[in-house]
Amino acid sequence: MARAPVLPALLCLAVLALAGGADARKMVGVYELKRGDFSVKMTNWGATIMSILVPDSKGNLADVVLGKDTLAEYVNDNSAFGPLNGRVAQRMARGRFVLDGKVYHTYINDGRNSIHGGHRGFSKVIWTVKEYVAGGDSPYITLYYRSFDGEQGLPGDLDVYATYQLTSPYELSIRTNATALNKATPVNFLQHVYLNLGGEGSGDILGHTLQLSASRYTPMDEELLPSSGRVDPVAGTSYDFRTPTPIGARIRQVKGGKFYGYDINYVIDGEGMRKVALARDGKSGRALELWANQPAMQLYTGNFLNHTKGKGGKLYEQYDGFCLETQAYPDAVNHPEFPSVTVRPGQVYKHDMLYKFSF
Ligand SMILES: *[C@@H]1O[C@H](CO)[C@@H](O)[C@H](O)[C@H]1NC(C)=O
Ligand SMILES: *[C@@H]1O[C@H](CO)[C@@H](O)[C@H](O)[C@H]1NC(C)=O
């Protein structure tokens, strides 16, 4: 159709004009992507997914993402409700690594270790809105961030793009890329979305069934680091989700640090863009299939939530949400036996995710 490309361009201009022109692209704002009754709200603060509205079979909409009411609360949030974590997401032992013979020290913000790119990782910066098309057949927003040499202790300038797009009915695609401009650097992004397919604030997710395309995992120590470097089979353990199993079925048999619950890295079978996980809430009938092109995925069951202020005055308790964080292996910078996360100048890191909802 000849007019298809014209319409999004007009919408884009209209929205930016309303928001105050080009300067508005660098201010913190809320951007909605809407396709029928499926909609996603984002902010360019930390490339954060604020909400995802999905119907159930009766057409009842629920927001399946835990989060906050105001942007100010997102700015002050320490629970990582929805953002894109980077430059090196997940834990890094002692915030230290050696690359090409040089020792680097990053920001320590998780006990004696670093997590999610440090105190001011990509989840705590303003991204530039490069393109925004709110409606039409495949609404999208492209966010851009130029990370600088030495940011949070990490080497080299890095160009980062993240595009969030509603590609088909009830599908959210996330495509990220990062180009190292002048120095080799580790890169690992993950989108830290807490999900509850019954709707945020509707109680715990222990009754959701989960199936993972993962026959191996990396055991974690008390500091949630894969210090042994082992990659063990899930067979015969409480980590085995190869067949659909309620998240709560064995949750008291596993510990993520000091709490009962899952906070564990799975090695995803196969490679390339492939199905990683299938989660289903029997009560509402909502399901989520997650695809990604990453080697691994952290399963986190909200073990640290504890009277945590959420949306509309609700308080989130332990296990009220779960995260499926596709990623590289945690602390890969300190484990040469794990797949490398080093991106050299001119090389491009690409992390694609696809959230397919059904009901
Ligand atoms: C990264 O993504 C942006 C936005 O989608 C795109 O314009 C750019 O070509 C991509 N860069 C690479 C190297 O793939
Ligand atoms: C929740 O907080 C209370 C009060 O600080 C504490 O006693 C309890 O151990 C905490 N539980 C979890 C799971 O964090």
Image: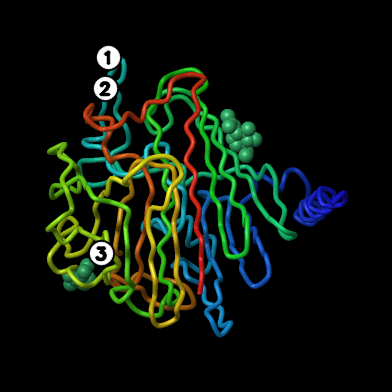
- Earlier in the chain: of badge 3 and badge 2, it is 2
At a point 72% along the width and 58% down the height, the residue shown is 137
At a point 46% along the width and 66% down the height, the residue shown is 67
> Marks 1 and 2: in contact by CB < 8 Å?
yes
The answer to whether the residue bearing label 3 lies less than 8 angstroms from the nearest atom of ligand 2 is yes
The answer to whether the residue bearing label 2 lies less than 8 angstroms from the nearest atom of ligand 1 is no
x, y percentage for residue 174?
A: 54, 49
User: What mark, if any, has residue 101 been given in the picture?
Assistant: 1
Under circle 1, the secondary element is loop
Farthest-out residue, top = 101
- Earlier in the chain: of badge 1 and badge 3, it is 1
Under circle 3, the secondary element is loop
Query: Which amino acid does the dot numbered 2 rest on?
Result: Val
Task: Write down which quadrant ligand 2 falls in.
Answer: bottom left
Q: Which residue is mark 2?
A: 98
Tell me which corner region of the image, top left, top right, bottom left or bottom right, holds residue 185: top left
Can you say whether 322 is above or below 84 in the image?
below
Q: Residues within 10 Å of mark 3 (few under 14, many from 20)?
A: many
How many marks on residues? 3
Query: Which amino acid does the dot numbered 1 rest on?
Result: Gly
Q: Which residue is mark 3?
A: 303
Under circle 2, the secondary element is strand
Q: Residues within 10 Å of mark 2 (few under 14, many from 20)?
A: few
> Marks 3 and 1: in contact by CB < 8 Å?
no
C-alpha gap between disc 2 and disc 1:
6 Å
User: What mark, if any, has residue 214 been given in the picture?
Assistant: none
Can you say whether 166 is above or below 318 in the image?
above
Q: Of residues 240 and 186, which is closer to you in this image?
A: 240
> Marks 2 and 3: in contact by CB < 8 Å?
no
Query: Which amino acid does the dot numbered 3 rest on?
Result: Asn
At a point 46% along the width and 74% down the height, the residue shown is 286
